[in-house]
Image: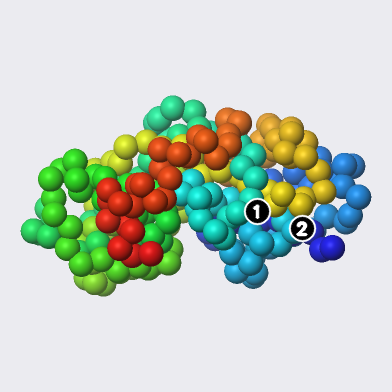
Amino acid sequence: MRLIASLPWYDLPPARTGLNAFWRVLRSELEPISALPLPDALERTMPLMEQWFHAGLLLSQCCGPDLFTPAARYLVPVARPVFMNLDCAPGDYYSHIVTIHRSLPARPRLVVNSPSSRSGCAALYEWLRRQQIEPGAVTISGAHATSLERLRNGDADVAAIDAHSWPLLNTPGLRIIGRSAPAPSPPFVMHQGAPFSRAQLQHALHTAIAGAGEAIGISGLVSSGREDYTAVHAEPAKRQTGCAELA
């Protein structure tokens, strides 16, 4: 069985050198406990959902609501990262609410990265509801970077962007006008068929963060399971936010 590993959630060009270094340290920690050869490099070509079904998936990431979708049925949450650059409780994150306008138009057009995304979909609808703003038409971009391009091109009026990814993106010309409520950060996950235990991977992640976490903006871990994400469970959250209509 071929083993694979990925760190897709923040795998943007400015972060790749740090992510590669992080994987090298993590790989050296996992190598003594794996009966199979570990990949030299992070997987960056296989579609994400295909990775989630792959029994040799050692490590990946997903959004909290993804854990409750059929595509993630074989994933085991391991822990969630503590981001160094965010002003919130350890193990949480939030989204910036972003536009090109000085103030939002009536019934602003939304762009979301994915219907199952906390940072790009549910967070945006929740913020609009708190501001008592009625949303207009909505499109799905597939990625935060693409959402920002849709704003810049005038195809949408507002988006929610994961605040940890913000410094890694092309943001000139865009304005942050708000901040979402915090939520548990996207978990590190493994396939239930991986050749070591959740506890072993958690220990290796702790060691890798101590040695190479600063380069990717992570200072620690908070142990997490599916139960930690029930508040952002895709189905009940979607019924309240409007994301269900996009699925």
The residue sitting at 41% across, 43% down in the picture is: 232
The residue sitting at 81% across, 43% down in the picture is: 196
Where is 206 relative to 216, above or below? above
From the viewer's perspective, tell me whether residue 204 is left or right of residue 185.
right
Where is 101 relative to 90, above or below? below
User: Is residue 127 in view?
Assistant: yes
- Observer-side mark, 2 or 1, equals 1
Residue 96 in the image: state x and y as whole percent: 32, 46
The residue sitting at 20% across, 48% down in the picture is: 128
Question: SS at mark 2?
Answer: loop
Q: Which residue is mark 2?
A: 56
Q: Quadrant of the N terminus?
A: bottom right
Residue 138 in the image: state x and y as whole percent: 25, 66
Residue 57 lies in quadrant: bottom right
**Other residues around mark 1 within 10 Å, as few (<14) / some (14–19) / many (≥20):** some
Q: Amino acid at mark 1?
A: Tyr
Report the disc number at residue 17.
none
From the viewer's perspective, tell me whether residue 10 is left or right of residue 115.
right
Residue 190 in the image: state x and y as whole percent: 68, 48
From the viewer's perspective, tell me whether residue 110 is left or right of residue 86.
left
Q: Earlier in the sequence, mark 2 or mark 1?
A: 2
Q: CA distance from mark 2 to mark 1?
A: 11 Å
Q: Nearer the viewer, residue 5 or 167?
A: 5
Task: Return the residue found at the far left.
Answer: 106
Q: Amino acid at mark 2?
A: Gly
Q: Nearer the viewer, residue 81 or 67?
A: 67
**Other residues around mark 2 within 10 Å, as few (<14) / some (14–19) / many (≥20):** many
Where is 107 relative to 218, above or below? below
User: Is residue 152 in view?
Assistant: no
Residue 72 in the image: state x and y as whole percent: 58, 55
Report the disc number at residue 74.
1
The residue sitting at 38% across, 41% down in the picture is: 94
